[in-house]
């Protein structure tokens, strides 16, 4: 992985499930669009949307949830090793655009490496 502004930030991981570099390049250049996921694990959110629809509520445009995973960092911490937040955007009109993190320009100071 190239050294980017985002790769230097401890604890911050930006990921796009199921997207390799060729997909990223095509979407950013406008040669392709993102397609709806067909992964089995996505069915959980679809069940929730089905229940919502049957209850007569409008569909969700997007949902966000925290996932508590891994061992506790220390007893009583309330945080685990692999806690993370995921977002599911069901309405593509809610995506206003895409961006690609740029590489760090080493001719300038890296704000993530500055000392206090």
Image (tube, helix red, strand yellow):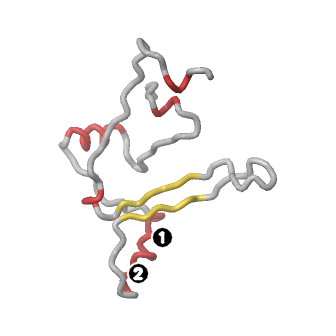
| Secondary structure of residue under mark 1 | helix
Q: Earlier in the sequence, mark 2 or mark 1?
A: 1
Q: Where residue 15 appears, x then y in whole percent?
A: 45, 45
Question: Closest to the observer: 56 or 112?
Answer: 112
Residue at position x 25%, y 44% in the image: 27
Question: Closest to the observer: 84 or 30?
Answer: 84
Residue at position x 25%, y 40% in the image: 28
Query: How would you rate the neighbour count of disc 1 (Cα within 10 Å): few for under 14, some for 14-19, many for 20 or more?
Result: few
Q: Are marks 2 and 1 in contact (CB under 8 Å)?
A: no
**Residue where numbered disc 2 is placed:** 52
Q: Where residue 51 appears, x then y in whole percent?
A: 43, 82
Residue at position x 49%, y 32% in the image: 7
Q: Image height check: is 80 above or below 58? A: above
Question: Closest to the observer: 43 or 110?
Answer: 110
**Residue where numbered disc 1 is placed:** 44
| Secondary structure of residue under mark 2 | helix
């Amino acid at each position: 992985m190239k050294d980017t502004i985002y790769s230097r930030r401890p604890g911050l991981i930006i990921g796009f499930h199921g997207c390799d570099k060729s997909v990223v390049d095509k979407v950013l250049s406008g040669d392709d669009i993102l397609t709806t996921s067909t992964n089995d694990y996505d069915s959980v959110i679809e069940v929730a949307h089905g229940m919502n629809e049957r209850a007569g509520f409008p569909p969700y445009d997007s949902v966000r949830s925290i996932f508590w995973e891994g061992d506790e960092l220390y007893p009583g911490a309330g945080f685990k090793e692999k806690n993370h937040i995921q977002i599911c955007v069901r309405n593509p009109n809610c995506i206003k655009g895409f961006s690609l993190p740029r590489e760090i320009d080493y001719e300038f100071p890296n704000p993530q490496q500055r000392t206090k």
